[in-house]
Image (spheres, rainbow, N blue to C red):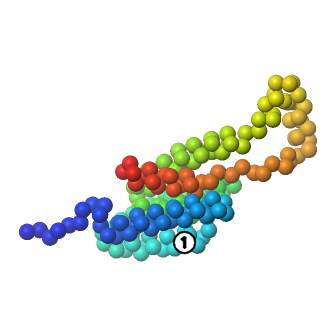
Amino acid sequence: MHPATPTPGLDPIYLASMVVLLLLVAAAIYMELLENRIPNSITYPALVVAIVLGYLPGGISLSSSVVGFAIGFGTLFAFYMFGGMGGGDVKLMGAVGALVGYPMVITTVVYTAVAGGVIAIFVMIWQLDFSRLGLLFSGKSGDVAATESVAGETGKKKTTIPYGIAIAIGCMLTLYIR
């Protein structure tokens, strides 16, 4: 008789990784909504736990965890370098990659990008300035645009996309559709 082998996906180490992942993205959503940032106090411990779990038999391997981190972190790092994303989002995606491992991180990155695009569209619609629509049809919109460019800043706050929420949605889609 063969010894019982755990059912794939039900291994305690794998389940622990997924619980940490769910706690991580829940904390990220909370902090994103509360402070519009994702602190290191959330991402660093999750990364450490992912590496420790990678050493243990039954879950994803350490090499899969490290490659997952590199892909998750690396895909968002370029956006961070050009000012299009916060550092917390980059570290969150790295920690997510370390928890889900390779190749699952690739699916997560794709779903995250789609979710981020959808969120960006909703944010742009939400912040649409309908007062300018009247100027467009009055024929004075060119004068207003020229005045604004001469005056410099229009006093509007920079639009940000809560990408931690997109990362959480990408994780959930990956786990659900997988």
Q: Which residue is mark 1?
A: 44
| Image position of 4 with respect to 108: above or below | below
Q: Name the spot of residue 114 as percent of width and height, x first.
A: 53, 44
Residue 153 horizontal side relative to residue 124, left or right: right
Q: Within 10 angstroms of label 1, few (less than 14), some, or many (20 or more) residues?
A: some
Q: Name the spot of residue 83 as percent of width and height, x first.
A: 69, 55
The quarter of the picture where residue 8 lies is: bottom left
Foreground residue, 162 or 95?
162
Residue 154 horizontal side relative to residue 88, left or right: right
Which quarter of the image is occupied by the N terminus? Answer: bottom left
Foreground residue, 127 or 100?
127
Amino acid carrying mark 1 in the image? Tyr
Label 1 secondary element: helix
The quarter of the picture where residue 37 lies is: bottom right
In the image, what residue occupies the spot 79% across and 31% down?
Answer: 133
In the image, what residue occupies the spot 34% across and 74% down?
Answer: 56
- The answer to whether one can see residue 68 in this image is yes
| Image position of 176 with respect to 42: above or below | above
Seen from this angle, which residue lies furthest left? 1
In the image, what residue occupies the spot 86% across and 24% down?
Answer: 139
| Image position of 140 with respect to 89: above or below | above
- The answer to whether one can see residue 109 in this image is no
